[in-house]
Image (spheres, rainbow, N blue to C red):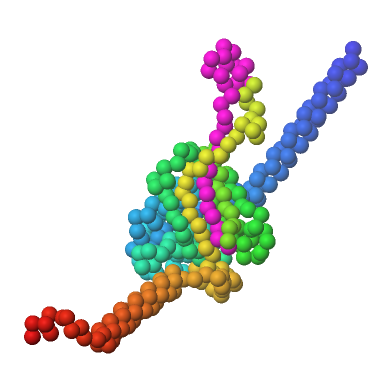
Amino acid sequence: MASRSAQASSLATNKKRKNEDREADDQEQNQILLSSSSSIKPYKSKVLILCSRGITYRMRHLMNDLANLITHGKKDAKLDSKHALPSINELADLNSCNHALYFECRRHTDLYLWAARCPNGPSIRFHVLNVHTMDEMKMTGNCLKGSRPIVTFGAEFDDLPHWKVCKEVLTNVFAVPKNARKAKPFVDHIISFSIVDGKIWFRNYQILQKSTIDPSATVNPKKKSTESSIVEDDDLSLTEIGPRFVLTPIKLFEGSFSGPCLWENKDFVPPVQAMKENKNLAALQYIARKDQETDREIRKEVLISKRPDNELEKRKVFA
């Protein structure tokens, strides 16, 4: 009996030791997980969206459309001075933003877009063309407000270095982080960037799924839901939502709204220069037309003076 009790006590002590060892191992693993999770901080991104004074209604509507697409964006008041762009870095710091989108209006007709990473750069200046807002287009596409988009780029963005920088900056601006405060856990639209003729074309599409449920069929809805849970690629389609516009890259700077110029578009013609050339062409056409009129009057007078007198004219017959 004594030996049996001793064996039972030894087994109990062994079980206690094993349980203690397991608890110690679990605690160590939990500590390792906590330390790793504390060392890996979640990626936080925020975009400051603002514009300059003198912006038109169409430019303002485009800015509002992009602000609705950029869920992790923060809108700010209009910037008073157009010559103190580095002060946007201070505004971004006050609003806890690490990226900035600045809409710059010139002469109430030309729209420029600055996309920058604050406060160290780089920054890119674009000329915005062919602007069409959501209210103007009235497309059939629609998506959930606050949902995260799939940002896609064409294969041309990997050809040249300045296109790679544009791709990185636009990705940081338009790609909504997973842990954004206002973002919803849904992906139902695609933002597309493609390069055509040296310009970046922006499009926004909704992801549509074709309905595979026959309303006239009498099938158990639970079974039907399990069968239709698998979505094939053929069942998906795209419908444009808007807005749409075209970006012409002008300059690429090393810093944020400042610094040395890393790349410049030599083929870009400023709108002011194009307007001057059109005015000069119209002026030359006007001068040529007036010269033709004066030449015609001179030729007419010469022909009249050289014309011989007619003896049957009234002034000679009734003289």
In the picture as drawn, the residue positioned furthest to the right comes out as 3
**Residue at the image point whose x is 85% and y is 22% from the top:** 11
**Residue at the image point whose x is 12% and y is 80% from the top:** 314
Q: Position of residue 261 (x, y in %)?
A: 56, 73
Q: Is residue 307 covered in magenta? A: no
The reply to whether residue 253 is visible in this rendering is no
Q: Is residue 207 covered in magenta? A: yes
The reply to whether residue 106 is visible in this rendering is yes
The magenta span reads: 198-226
Q: Where is residue 175 in the image (x, y as percent from the top left)?
A: 56, 49
**Residue at the image point whose x is 71% and y is 44% from the top:** 32
Q: Is residue 178 left or right of residue 10?
A: left
Quadrant where the C terminus lies? bottom left
Of 163 and 43, the residue lying toward us:
163
Q: Position of residue 101 (x, y in %)?
A: 47, 59
Q: Is residue 92 left or right of residue 35?
A: left
